[in-house]
Each structure stands twice: as C-alpha cells, then as structure tokens.
Image: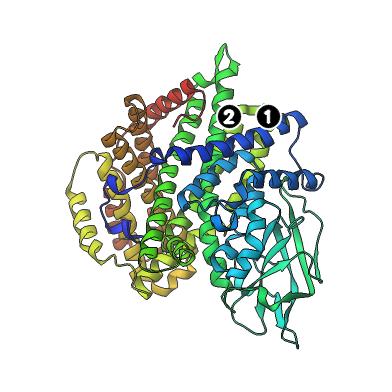
Amino acid sequence: MKQGGSWLSQRIAEGDVFVPEEFSEEQQMIRDSVIEFCIKEIQEPIKKRGRELSAVKDLPEIIALLEKAGEYGFCGVSIAEQYGGMDLDFNTGVLFAEANAQGFSFATTIGAQTSIGSLPIVFYGNEEQKAKYLPGIASGQLKASYCLTEPGAGSDANSGKTTARLTEDGKSYMINGQKMWITNGGFADIFIVFAKIDNDKNLSAFIVEKSYPGLSTGAEEEKLGIKGSSTVQVFFNDCLVPKENLLGERGGGFKMALNILNTGRMKLAAGGIGGSKFAHTKAIEYANQRVQFREPIANFGAIKHKLGEIAVKTWMHESALYRTGKQIDIKTQELIARGQSASDAKINAVREYAIEAALLKFTCSEVMDYSIDEALQVYGGMGYAVETGIEMGYRDSRILRIYEGTNEINRMLSQAELGRRIAKTKELSLRPATKMVRDHIIKRIFLRGADDEATAVFNLKVAFLYLSGVVGRSMGKELVREQEIVMNMADMMAVAYVAESGWLRYNKLKEQQLVNQETLEVLFKVNQVYLFNALTSAQQWGKEIIYAFTENNPRQRKRMMARLNALTTRYAVNAKNLRRDIAEYSCSKGSYPF
C-alpha cells in the first residue's frame, strides 16, 4: 500500500503489512516503561488519594508529573536527539501514545507536550527556533500548548478572528484575539498560536512565550472528564511577539494545522486502543471475581457477549492502526531517499495516509467509548462509584470523539480526501477496480452458498466501491450537502479497512508462526465475529444510502439492493458462540489476552 487509499483497489498480501507482534524488544521496552510510569506515578497515587487529580485544585502536582515524565525522556519522543529527544519513528510514537492511555487524563497533558505543542516547531521551525525551544520541551522544563480553537472557530478553524499586525518598527507582531479549550494552557511556557496577518486568507503560526506582554489566561475550566489536565482560555491583548517567532511561512498556518492534526489523529486512535485494552482488563477482573447466583458473572452469556465484543473490536482496530503507522514510516524513508529533509518527509508521509488517519480517529475513539461503557455495565452499580475508577474512564473517553476534529468531521474528511485524490489531483486511480467491481458483483448475483472469510473481506471493499461509484456519479457536487450519506460511506470504508487489516494480520501470524496455536484459533474467531458484524452493518448503511437517493426510482432501488445483498448477506457464522469462546479465553488469561 504505497499510497493512501490504494488498498481499495489492490489485493494486499499478508507479508506486506506490519503486525504488532513484530515490534522489537526495544520498542516493547519503551511501551512497558511508559505503562510502568503510569501505574507507579498515576494509578497507584489515585488509589491512595481516593480521587483523580484536578487541574482546578492540583496544578502543581500535574506540573511536577509532567516534569518527571521529562526526566524519563518521555517529553522528547518526537524530538531529534541533537535537541535532547528520542526521535522515535512514527509507529513507535503511536505505541507510546497507546501506552499513555494507562495514565488517564495525563495522556492529554503529555499528548499536547509531545504532539500538537511541539511538532509545529519540530516540522516547521528554523534552526534558531529549534535550538531555542526544543531542548526545554524535551526535558519537560518548558511546557507547550497549541492555540487554534476560538469561540467562533471550531471545526472551521480557518475562520478564526485572532489577528496579527506587524508593528511600525517592523520588529514585532501585535496579536489580538481569544483562544479556548487550550490544553496545558494553565501552566504552559510557550504557545503555538494561529492568527491571520492583516487581511490574509489563511492563518499563520507564531511561537508565543508566556512572558510576552499582552498574554493572559483564564481560569481552569470545569470539565466532564480529563479533569487532571489543564484547560483554559488564552487572551491576546496587543500581545507583542518578536518577528522572528513567526513559525513557518506567512499564511502557512492552516496547512500546518491540518498536517499536525493528521499526526494527532493517529496518536488519538492509539489512545483509544490503549484505553479499550484497559477497559477490557478491568471488566475481566471484575467479572471473574463478582459472584451472583452462586457463580462468577463471567459465566453468564450476557457478560460473555460484552467481553467478547470488546476483545474483537480492540484487536481488529489495533491491526489497522499499526499497519498504517508502519506505512507512514516506510513512506518517510522513501521520501528521504528521494532527497526530502527528514521534517518534510515526515509531514508528507503522514499526509499521504490522511484518509486512513481520519478513519482510524473516528473508529478507534468509538471502540474506546464502547469498551468503557460496556466495562461499566459489567461492574453494574459499582461502576458508577468513584472508587472503582471506571466512571472516570467513562467520562474521560468522551472527549476522544471531539478532539482532533469531531468524528463527524473526520468521516466527511475521509471521503472528501478520497474524492479529491481521485477527481482533482489524480493522485489516486480506482479505474482498475471498475471492471473488477462489475465482474465480481455479476458473479455474486448468480452465486449460491456461504462465503469464506477472504471473500467476505473482499466483499466489504467491493460494496464500498460500488456504492461510492454510483452515488458519486448520480449526485456529483450535490453529495457534499448530503452529509448523512457521506458519513455512511465513511463507515463502510472504515469497516472494510479494519476487516482487511485484521484478516491480513491473522494470516501473517499463521504463516510465520508468531503466536501459539491456541491463540491463533481464538484470533480466527475474532476475525469471524468482526466480519459478521461488519457485513451486517455495511448492509444497513448501504440500504440507507440506496434508499436516500433512489426514492423516485424504485427499479434502480431494487437493482442496487439486490447487488448490495449479494455482497453482504452470505457470510454465515454463529457469532454468539464465537463471542463466548473469545470471552472464555480472555477470562482464563485474567486480562486483555492479545
């Protein structure tokens, strides 16, 4: 998969994908050290304290925690070694983000430090800016934040009203405006601030130090979740910023923000997977020890359904996450070999997989929401109590569907980017798939009998390609106004990508004997359950799409439904029993088992 989106029209071999079981010993040590830090410095103190940290009450403790993370080297994971960082490759950075989910709201704090708060300087800063700021960020002595969102500019970030004007002496920019929902803003030393210079169409970016006159912050926000992270408004009243603190090119801030968000989406998806594993483990622990009707509740079918589903969703989406992360690393090295600088190569490699990053952002965050919700349900009334920590996870998880572009925005972005690459820039061609889709559907209509797993995976891709082609030709530019249809298309694309990723991972594990036979048999069942769910959902999403634009053409509706059903209704497994087997295996291990 050398191009983002190209997997739609290609048959991918299992040898061409990376699987998490291939992480090196060094990469696993980084993950384990982060988890150990989170347990020792965050989870255990919460148990002793009897409550989570609150930015409203405990800001000094939160600052000290970030500084301690800096002592471990965790604040410099994406910063070059010459500036005191670890300079991890992208996929290891994704693994780092997954491990940080064990730190609850601290994941937000360190996420802002290592991603959106520092990457603009890493990728776009000149040598003087990098030398001045990156060593302090890497050590944790300088705290970083990112100021993009405004009261009137959320999803439409480029509509921000914050302004920058060059002073008469030409030495400084004077910034005026207001930013909100700024993570780490209550204690940050530097702010990456986006503003429009004069009457520019697009934003520019600036490095603004806390000490600059005219900068002030509001009180800590009282939030539903992530209470242990600082969130404030930031105000700029004739704030004077040295001219040399313009970051990147004038007018390049909006493009910069989009590129940083692509990276953030992958890291957020990783946090969703890490949180889901944590929720699964907590649910298993409680289900194994909670006795009702004279036996552990883990023995009951209703509980097995929940535990089985969490395992399925988590493992399958993890497969897609690290498959994508590795492709970004491969693309980075390819671009460096072509002569691009390391910074440009990293930016462009992530941009290449912007479609997949958007898919993973919305789908992994929803896996996390599902997992913690069902974990709380396993706990029953105890899950509602503060002492178990489950209610904190429930509250903390909700922000994932809003961060880095809402899930609705990411659904529409994935389809807009796919359409742009096909129709406008011609970067991606799905033309070779046209005949394949047509021939496959014709064959399906006349075929009888149940599908195997490989066919089911392929059918999900064909179903998406078929409907996106028909809808695109029928609706053209009007499709942009039909957001419900676009979001259904995004969901169909996402399950196709995840299904293929999980199936390829399973086959690679089998061929290379990377796991034992017992685990392999359970993972086959994981794939079966996911495919059963995915095809059922795809049939429903496809039906909604077809019924939405064939209202006045019953003949076309009937024809399209016959083709959709031929692709989505012939995979037959006993999902109930498979989930039970997966749940029993998980409970026998006592924690998330994969």
Callout 2: helix, strand or loop? helix
Callout 2 amino acid: Lys
Q: Which one is nearer the viewer's eye here, 73 or 258?
A: 73
User: Relative to the observer, which residue lies in front, 115 or 176?
Assistant: 115
Q: CA distance from mark 2 to mark 1?
A: 9 Å
Who is closer to the viewer here, 408 or 485? 408
Q: Which residue is at a point 26% across and 48% down the rendered structure image? A: 13
Checking the image for residue 388, the label placed there is: 1
Q: Position of residue 256 (x, y in %)?
A: 55, 69
Residue, far top: 294
Q: Residue tagged by mark 2?
A: 282
Task: In the rendered view, tell whether residue 410 sits above or below residue 19.
Answer: below
Please tell me which of labels 2 and 1 falls first in the chain: 2
Residue 562 x %, y %: 27, 53
| Quarter of the image where one finds residue 329 | bottom left
Residue 103 higher or lower than 5, as above or below:
above
Name the element at disc 1.
helix
Badge 1 amino acid = Thr
Vertical placement of 181 versus 162: above or below? above
Q: Nearer the viewer, residue 285 or 409?
A: 285
State the image quarter where residue 526 is shown.
top left
Relative horizontal placement of residue 322, taking residue 255 as reference (left or right): left
Coordinates of residue 506 in the picture (x, y in percent) = 33, 38
Q: CB under 8 Å between callouts 2 and 1?
A: yes
Quadrant of the image occupied by residue 516:
top left
Q: Is residue 225 visible?
A: no
Q: How many marks?
A: 2
- Give how far across and how far down residue 199 sits, in percent: 65, 85
